[in-house]
Each structure stands twice: as C-alpha cells, then as structure tokens.
Image (tube, helix red, strand yellow):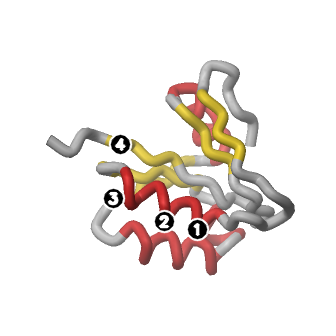
Amino acid sequence: LPIPDEALRIDLVVRKNLPRFLDVTTAILDELAVQEAIIAQEMPGASPAIYDELRALLGAIPIRQVPHEEFKALTAQSRAVVRSGEFTPYANVILVAGVVF
C-alpha cells in the first residue's frame, strides 16, 4: 500500500509477518478513541480470517467497506501510517480517531 509523503511513517517492520497486522492494531486500539474503521471491500473475500479477527477486535466500532482504489485515495488524508510486517492481502485498516474528552 503506498504511503502518502505528507503522512508520518511509523515503520515497525522487523521481518516478513513481524509484527503482525492484528497485533499492531490491538496496540493502537488500546491507545486511541476510534470512531470508525475503514477497510477495502476486498478484504473479507481475499483474507477472511484476518477480516473475522479484525471484526471481533473492533467490537462495536463501525466498519465501512470501500473499494481498494478508494481506500488508497483515503490514505492521502492520514496523519500517520503504521507499517507492520504483515504480508496478508488487504490487511490494512484506516482508523478514524476522535478525542477521549
């Protein structure tokens, strides 16, 4: 997934599949007040196990599915992009965060 030049890049990759997408997402969810998650609509079909685990992890947080090309365009609005070592297709999520107060 291309990372926009304007976004802060947080590169956590140690090697292929380390750290995993879901582990990184879990850590981020512990720290942010997430209002919405956006995924590529291709994720459920291409990577059903990741999708099911992500859905469970997000709990009551709404998930919006958009075409992959739209997903890539939405990354241009990102403040930061966290890169995991995940190699599973479509294992990406945009987390729309609010404030806790």
Query: Left of 17 or right of it: where is 20?
Result: left
- Front position among marks 2 and 4: 2
The furthest residue to the left: 101
Give the residue number, with chain letter if any, for mark 1.
Answer: 23
User: Which amino acid, mark 1?
Assistant: Asp
- Residue occupying the point 64% across, 40% down: 10
Residue 83 numbered tag:
none
Q: Closer to the N terminus: mark 4 or mark 3?
A: 3
Q: Closer to the N terminus: mark 2 or mark 4?
A: 2
Query: Left of 36 or right of it: where is 17?
Result: right
- Front position among marks 4 and 3: 4
Q: Are marks 4 and 3 in contact (CB under 8 Å)?
A: no
Q: Closer to the N terminus: mark 4 or mark 1?
A: 1
Q: Which of the 4 image quarters holds residue 90?
A: bottom right
Q: Position of residue 4 (x, y in %)?
A: 67, 26
Give the residue number, with chain letter if any, for mark 3.
Answer: 62
- Residue occupying the point 58% across, 34% down: 75
Give the residue number, with chain letter if any, for mark 4.
Answer: 97
> What separation in Å lies between label 1 and label 2 (alpha carbons)?
5 Å
43 in relation to 8, above or below: below
> What separation in Å lies between label 1 and label 3 (alpha carbons)?
20 Å
> What separation in Å lies between label 2 and label 3 (alpha carbons)?
16 Å
Q: Residues within 10 Å of mark 2 (few under 14, many from 20)?
A: few
User: Which amino acid, mark 2?
Assistant: Thr
The furthest residue to the right: 15
Q: Quadrant of the C terminus?
A: top left
User: Which amino acid, mark 4?
Assistant: Ala
Q: Closer to the N terminus: mark 2 or mark 3?
A: 2
- Front position among marks 2 and 3: 2
